[in-house]
Structures are given as C-alpha cells and as structure tokens.
C-alpha cells in the first residue's frame, strides 16, 4: 500500500497554497470575524473554480469525481491558511451524506460552491456555521433539512455551532457512517495543515528573535521543541493518507477503515495541539495577542480538536476494535 502522494497531488497542493497565499487569508479571517463575509466568498469562488467544492461529487452533478486522498490534500492546504467556514461539512460530509440518502439532485449546488453543514448526533450534535449554510440533520437514520437553534459562539471567532431543528425529511434508513468518516478525516487534514503553519510561524520567529546576541532558534531547547512538532506532523501525515486510501477502497481486505480514520484524527489533533503549545512557548506573550496571526491558528485548532469527536472519543473507538 503506497502512502506517498503523486505529482498530481503535489501540484494540487502547490496551486491551492499559491492561490490562498495571494488571497491574504489573515485579512479574510478577520473580516469574517467582524461580520463581513464578502472577502471569504471570493476565496470560496476561487476554490470552486479549482474544483475543491466538488471533489467528492460525481462529474454528472458538476463535481470532479475525485476521492478521499485528493480531499485530504486539499483540506490540509485549507487548514494551512485557516480558511473559515464549514469546510469539512461542505466539501466532505454533506456530499457523502446526500449520496447515501439518494438525494443527489442536491449535489449540483454544492459543486457550484454552495456551503452546507450537518449535525449527526451523538458524535456531532452541533452543526458548524449553520447560519451561513444549508443545514442537514441526521436523527436515527432520518435525513432532514434543518434550521439552526441555540446558536453559540466558538473559541474560533469565525465559527459558530448550533443545534438543529428538523424541517423536511428527505430520506429514511440512511447509514451516516460514511459521511461521519469523511468528516472526521477532513477535520484531521485541516488540523495537519494548522500544525504545519504554526510550526512555520514559530520557526520564523525563532530565527528573527535574538537573546544574548543570538537567535533563539540556535538554542538547543528551542530546536528540540520545534523538532518534536515536526516529528509529530510527519508521523500523523501517513495516518491521514492511509485512512484516505481506506475510504477510497485501496487497502487490503479486512482493514478496519473506521479505526484508521479515528487514528488519523487522534494523531493529527495531537500534532496540532503540540504545535500550538510549542509555538506559544517560542513566541511568548506576543503569541497570545489577537493582533498576531498566530492567534488565528490557535483558536481554529482549539475549535477543531473537538469537532467530529474528541481525542478521547476516537481513542475509545480504536480501543473497541482491539478487544
């Protein structure tokens, strides 16, 4: 089983990275936090033109007919730039959920860039950003369109979470398992990207900040801190890619894909959490300020660590498969 991504995937990652770098995401994120969605809509339009919105949607409905490996490559780049909005839901969970519900007539709008979100209790009892997206609720196999209620702020200023109230049932007896798996994996990919950017911010600061006439990055303790993060990221990435191969059916028969997805979320979350902590240690007090871009990544990391299942939930899920 080959975990290495191909040149095509590397080209996809590079093109998305270049596009998002030009979009000045820190300004877009701060605008979203202040209630101005227009800059983000321009970013979403570019992502749609690049085919990201329709990665898991068939060509017959305007999508790319791609797979989970392309999805995680794209979501890692979106995580690197902390793109706001219900990304795991719009790009991954809802397309798969609608396909499982035989509601494929709703997929074209997603491929064209419409935002969507969903709640699938008990793992995901709240829907992210439901006030800005079409919402779906899964309740005991019933898939319904839904309206947000009890909307709450998140530690991430660009994100809200809401309970959903069912409107119209569109399908019954739907297996939400595949939608849950891709949502968990998409969130893991975002966390991997966030971890990489926080490491880059810390490394750049360590090279520029001087104490006793030397860059603090030359101190062995700082080197070890950053090396630990780099190792955690590189150990998590094959788990994310391996789980994506499992979802795409490119693994040996008998592979427990659910367990691999949970392992990917745990590893990526641990790497992002470690990267956040070590970045704060390197930057010191300035890293806590809202004015520094690091704060944008710290808060999104904190929000996504619990999205689509906490580390404890997924560790328990892994443990259940080992009994």
Image (cartoon, rainbow, N blue to C red):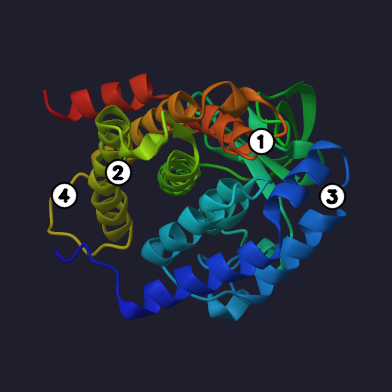
Q: Nearer the viewer, mark 4 or mark 1?
A: 1
Residue 292's tag is 1
Q: Earlier in the sequence, mark 3 or mark 1?
A: 3
Residue 43 placement, left or right of 95: right
Residue 255's tag is 4
Label 4 packing within 10 angstroms: few (<14), some (14-19), many (20+): few
Residue 136 placement, left or right of 196: right
- Label 2, label 4: how far apart the Cα atoms are: 28 Å
Q: Earlier in the sequence, mark 4 or mark 3?
A: 3
Residue 37's tag is 3
- Label 3, label 1: how far apart the Cα atoms are: 21 Å
Q: Which residue is mark 2?
A: 230
Q: Nearer the viewer, mark 1 or mark 2?
A: 1
What is the x, y in percent for residue 25? 69, 53
- Label 4, label 3: how far apart the Cα atoms are: 42 Å
Measured along the vertical axis of the image, is residue 298 above or below residue 201? above
Measured along the vertical axis of the image, is residue 135 above or below residue 149? below
Q: Nearer the viewer, mark 3 or mark 1?
A: 1
What is the x, y in percent for residue 61? 62, 75
Q: From where the camera sits, is residue 282 visible?
A: yes
Q: Earlier in the sequence, mark 2 or mark 4?
A: 2
User: Residue sitting at 58 percent across and 28 percent down?
Assistant: 287
């Amino acid at each position: 089983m080959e975990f290495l991504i191909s040149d095509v995937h590397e080209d996809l990652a590079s093109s998305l990275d270049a596009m998002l770098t030009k979009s000045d995401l820190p300004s877009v994120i701060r605008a979203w936090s202040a209630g101005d969605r227009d800059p983000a809509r321009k970013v979403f339009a570019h992502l749609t033109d690049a085919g990201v919105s329709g990665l898991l949607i068939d060509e017959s409905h305007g999508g790319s007919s791609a797979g989970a490996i392309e999805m995680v490559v794209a979501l890692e780049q979106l995580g690197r730039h902390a793109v706001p909005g219900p990304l795991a839901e719009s790009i991954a969970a809802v397309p798969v959920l609608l396909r499982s519900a035989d509601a494929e007539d709703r997929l074209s709008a997603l491929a064209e860039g419409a935002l969507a979100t969903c709640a699938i209790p008990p793992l995901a009892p709240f829907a992210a950003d439901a006030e800005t997206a079409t919402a779906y609720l899964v309740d005991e196999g019933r898939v319904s369109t839904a309206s947000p209620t009890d909307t709450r702020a998140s530690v991430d200023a660009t994100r809200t979470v809401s309970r959903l109230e069912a409107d119209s049932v569109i399908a019954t007896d739907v297996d939400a398992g595949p939608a849950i798996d891709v949502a968990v994996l998409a969130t893991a990919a975002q966390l991997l990207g966030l971890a990489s950017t926080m490491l880059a911010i810390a490394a750049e600061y360590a090279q520029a900040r001087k104490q006793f006439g030397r860059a603090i990055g030359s101190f062995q303790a700082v080197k070890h801190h950053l090396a630990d993060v780099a190792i955690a990221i590189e150990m998590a990435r094959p788990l994310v890619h391996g789980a994506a191969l499992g979802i795409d059916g490119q693994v040996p028969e008998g592979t427990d894909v659910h367990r691999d997805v949970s392992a990917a979320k745990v590893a990526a979350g641990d790497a992002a959490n470690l990267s956040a902590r070590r970045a704060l240690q390197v930057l010191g007090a300035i890293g806590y300020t809202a004015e520094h871009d690091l704060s944008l990544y710290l808060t999104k990391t904190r929000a996504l660590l619990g999205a689509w299942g906490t580390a404890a939930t997924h560790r328990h899920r892994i443990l259940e498969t080992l009994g």
